[in-house]
Amino acid sequence: MGHLFQRRVLLGVCGGIAAYKSAELVRSLQNHGAQVRVIMTRGAQEFITPLTLQALSGHGVHDSLLDEEAEKGMGHIELARWADLLLIAPATADCMARLVAGRADDLLSAVALATEAPILIAPAMNQQMWANTATQANLQTLEKRKINIAGPASGDQACGEVGPGRMLEPPQIAEQAASLFSSRILDGKRVLLTAGPTLEPLDPVRYLSYHSSGRMGYALARAALEAGAAVDLVTGPTNLTPPDRATVHAVSTAQEMLDACLSLKASCDIFIACAAVADYRPSAVSEQKIKKSGEQTELMLAPNPDIVATITASEPKPFTVGFAAETEKLREYAQGKRQRKRMDMIVANDVSNPAIGFNSDCNAALMLWEGGELELAHSTKETMAARIMAQVAELL
C-alpha cells in the first residue's frame, strides 16, 4: 500500500460546484500525513473562499501567476519544484482542455507545465460534457501523457441530471493519490535526532566544545526524511543548511539540548543521538571577558547531563541509537556504552583516523546491537546514513 506521509501535495481547485468538496479533500490528504498547499483558479473562488482552504491547509492560498512575495517573483516555478504530487480536483472540462493545449496563462496551468511531479486529476462536470467527443479525446490525450485520472463517478448531479461526471468522494481521491507512491521503510515514524556540537560558555567570548561539523547528523536527518519519517532535528551551532522538511530546534548548550529532547520525546518513535555533546561545562560563567594574566589558571568543570541516559531511563523508551567516537578498543568501549545506557543500537567510529574523524566528508563505522553487528566500509556520510536508517528499520 502506498503512503502520503510527509509527501507534498499541491491541490489545484477549479471552478465547478464540486469545489465545495475541496475542503474535505484537504483534510483527507492531511489524514494520510500529507503536507498540502492550494492553488485556486478565479472560477474556484466563486464557489468556495480562499480563507476556508487557507485555514484548513495552514498555508496561504495561491492564485497569482506572478507572485510578488515569491522568491524572484516566480511563484509557479517554486510551487512546481515544491510538489511531490499535483492533484487537480475538481478538474473541469475547461481545465482538461487547457492541459491538453499546454496553456500557461494562469497559475495552475503554468505549474502543470513546469512540474516534474506526477499529476492526478479528478474530473467533475455535467454528464453530457463528460460524454462529449472533445472531452473524451482530451481524456485520451492526457492518459497518453501519463497523467493519472481519478474517476469520475456516476450518479445525481447538481444540474439535476444523472450520469457519469460526478467528482469522486475526497477519501477515494486521497486513496488513489496515496497509491501513486510506494511505501518507504520508515513511513509513519517520527525521528528525534540530535546533531552538531554543544557550546559551553566560559565567558561572553569563549566556550568549551567538541570538534564536530554536524555533517553526519544532518546526513542522518536527510536519510530519515527520504525513508518517510517525520524528523525533529535538535541541532547545536553548525554552518550547514538543515534539510528543508525537518523541523529544526536550534540549541547551544548541553542543557538546552536535553530540554529540547525531553519536550519532544513523547511523540517520537526513534531517538538518534548523533550530537557531540560536551561532557563538562565551566562551573561558573564569567559575566565579563576573563583577562589574560600571563599566569597559570585553573578551570573548574561540572559534569553535563547525559542526554542519552536520561532519554532511555524514561518511559516509554523510544528505539534509541547512539554514537561512540573512540580512539582505541572500538568494539569493547562501544558495546559497553550501548549496554550501560540501554541503547538499542550504537554506531562506533575511530576518530583517531583523520580520514574518517570529525569534520571529514567520509566515515567508516561499526554498528552494534543486541546479538548482531555490521561493519560499514569507508564511504560518504550520506551513504552511511542511508545504511544506518535501513538497519534501524530492520531492527524495528
Image (cartoon, rainbow, N blue to C red):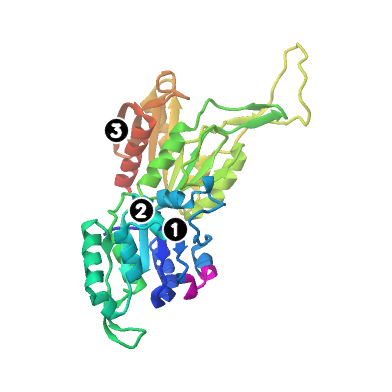
The numbered disc on residue 324 is: none
> Is residue 145 or residue 300 the one in the foreground?
145
Q: Earlier in the sequence, mark 2 or mark 1?
A: 1
| Cα–Cα span, label 3 and label 2 | 46 Å
| Cα–Cα span, label 1 and label 3 | 51 Å
Q: Earlier in the sequence, mark 1 or mark 3?
A: 1
Q: Residue at x 61, y 37 (%)?
A: 252
Is residue 370 a member of the stretch shown in magenta? no
Q: Which segment is the magenta one? A: 45-52
**Where residue 242 sits: x, y (%)?**
49, 40
Magenta span: helix, strand or loop, mainly?
A: helix
The type of residue carrying mark 1 is: Leu
Q: Which residue is mark 2?
A: 113
Q: Residue at x 45, y 52 (%)?
A: 76
Is residue 51 a member of the stretch shown in magenta? yes
The type of residue carrying mark 3 is: Leu
**Where residue 52 sits: x, y (%)?**
52, 70
Q: Which residue is mark 3?
A: 374
Q: Does the image show residue 213? A: yes
Q: Residue at x 76, y 29 (%)?
A: 286
Q: Which residue is mark 1?
A: 107
